[in-house]
Structure formats: C-alpha cells, structure tokens
Amino acid sequence: MVAADLHVHTTRSDGTLTLSSLPAAASRAGVDAVAVTDHDRLHPDLEAPLTTHDGLTVVSGVELRVDTGDQRLDLLGYGVDPTDALTAECARIQRDRRERGQRIIDRVEDRLGVSLDLEPRDGLGRPHIARAIADATDYTFQGAFDDLIGDDCPCYVERDVPRFERGRDLLADACGLVGLAHPFRYPDTPAALDHCASLDAVEYWYPYGRAVDDTMLDDAIEDYDLVPTGGSDAHGESVGETGLDERAWNLVREALDV
C-alpha cells in the first residue's frame, strides 16, 4: 500500500492539483504524505520543509533539470528550506521558460497557421502548449508532442538549464535530501545512475508503464548508500499510483531529519 507519493506536480508548474485540493486527492488514494515537486519552482505556501495541510503531510520539494554534458537529468530535492541562490536560479529558469514558451508558441502558430489561446508565464511547460494545440487543432495532446513540440521536433526549443554540478550543489544547500528522478527515462540509464555517487537518493518506485531492471537500482543503492524514494509523477487530479510503503517513507523522514 502506498503511504507516500513523493513526486507530485501542482498548478505552480504543469499539474492541475492545488495545495488546497491535494488533501482530498490523497485521502481518495489512501496516501498519508505527498511531496510537491514542481518543475524548477518552489511553492510559496509551503513555509517549512515539512508541513501539515488538512491532515496531509506535505514535503516541500522541487524537480530541477540539469545538464551532464551527455544528457539531461531531473533531480528531486526534498525538504526545501530555500536559499537565496536556489531562489535566484529558479527565477532565472522561469524567465527562460517564458522566453522559450513564446518561441515554441510562435513556431507552432507559424507552422499551423493558428492562434493558440496561451500566453507565456512562470511555470509554463510543454504540456500547457500541447493542451492549447489540442484545443485549437485536430492534434491530440500526445500528437502535439510526437509531431510538433517533442524533442527534436520542428517546433521544439531547448531550455537553458544548469550544469549537473551546480544544480546538485544548489539543491544540497537547500534540501534535506537530493535524488535522481526516474532513472529509466533517460537515454543512458547506467550513466545517469553513475551520477548518484554524489547524491543522497534515487527514485526507485515510478510508473514507467513497462518492465525495468530493478537490479540496477538495487546495485546503485548499495554502492552509493542511497535512500530509495518514489512517486507517481502526478500531473492530474490523482495521486498515489505508486510510491513508498510506510517503512520506506519512515526511512525518508529519518533522512530528512524533520
């Protein structure tokens, strides 16, 4: 049974849940705790690393994309106590998101000859643009990614993200626990796991929708003394598709020391 879903997005980035709607969603799923891990953005209403909202334990977190030189990875910071440096970097990334979003929107509108009902803003991500494309054209949400705005597609624009070392250090200074997100989503999983040598955790439970080699994660956890985390990567109204059982959640709480 899932006790904690430590990978949840809200309307602060590209999710549909809000902080006020999270407790009900967690209650429906029988989940006791969630981590709010919006993309490159901190939640202003989470005033401590660990808080309680309508009986739900909420971990303040963030998901930060970083560049290793060979591939881009996502890092999850848990138990955020914001530093000036992390706050400034998140603000810089949001400026880049707005500018990048406008460039993608312009490319889509020029290519399709349509006007998308969408304005660049903080937290804007490609899912927002894909939904706007689906609303304005015959493309489906997934089709917009597959044909237009996915990686290497004609309307894609790359983001300006920090190097791995800088992103890791920013999170390490501000968070109680820093881990690698969804290791089997990267082109080179072994290389991604090698970076766990300088991290605290790895996302062990994740809804890939396919079989993965858990022994690679087991080896990384043993080799680098990692804390296993996990979550549903929720972007919709439901949480708890996967995550931590009570024992694993207690290990995370101990590591966070809160």
Image: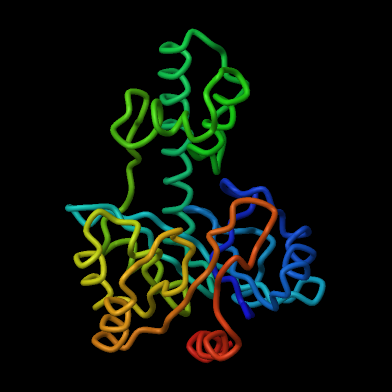
Asked if residue 211 lies left or right of residue 90, the reply is left
Q: Position of residue 216 (x, y in %)?
A: 27, 76
Farthest-out residue, top: 113
Task: Tell which residue pokes out farthest to the front in this image.
Answer: 211
Q: Nearer the viewer, residue 207 or 158?
A: 207
Residue 199 image-quadrant placement: bottom left
Q: Say if 61 sits above or below 51 in the image.
A: above
Give how far across and how far down residue 158 sits, in percent.
32, 36
The answer to whether residue 20 is above or below residue 111 is below
Q: Decide if residue 193 is on the left or right side of residue 205.
A: left
In the image, 154 versus 101, the foreground residue is 154
Asked if residue 251 is positioned above or below residue 76 in the image, the reply reads below
Q: Measuring 31% from the left and 88% from the top, which residue is drawn there?
A: 225
In the rendered view of the protein, which quadrant contains the N terminus? bottom right
Residue at 52% of width from left, 67% of height from top?
Answer: 82
Q: Quadrant of residue 249?
A: bottom right
Specify the quadrant of the image occupied by residue 217: bottom left
For the C terminus, the image quarter is: bottom right
- Give residue 88's position: percent from left, percent from top: 45, 54
Residue 165 location (% of width, % of height):
26, 64
Q: Nearer the viewer, residue 67 or 89?
A: 67
Q: Give the residue at x 46% y 12%.
A: 112
What scheme was used to colour the molecule? rainbow
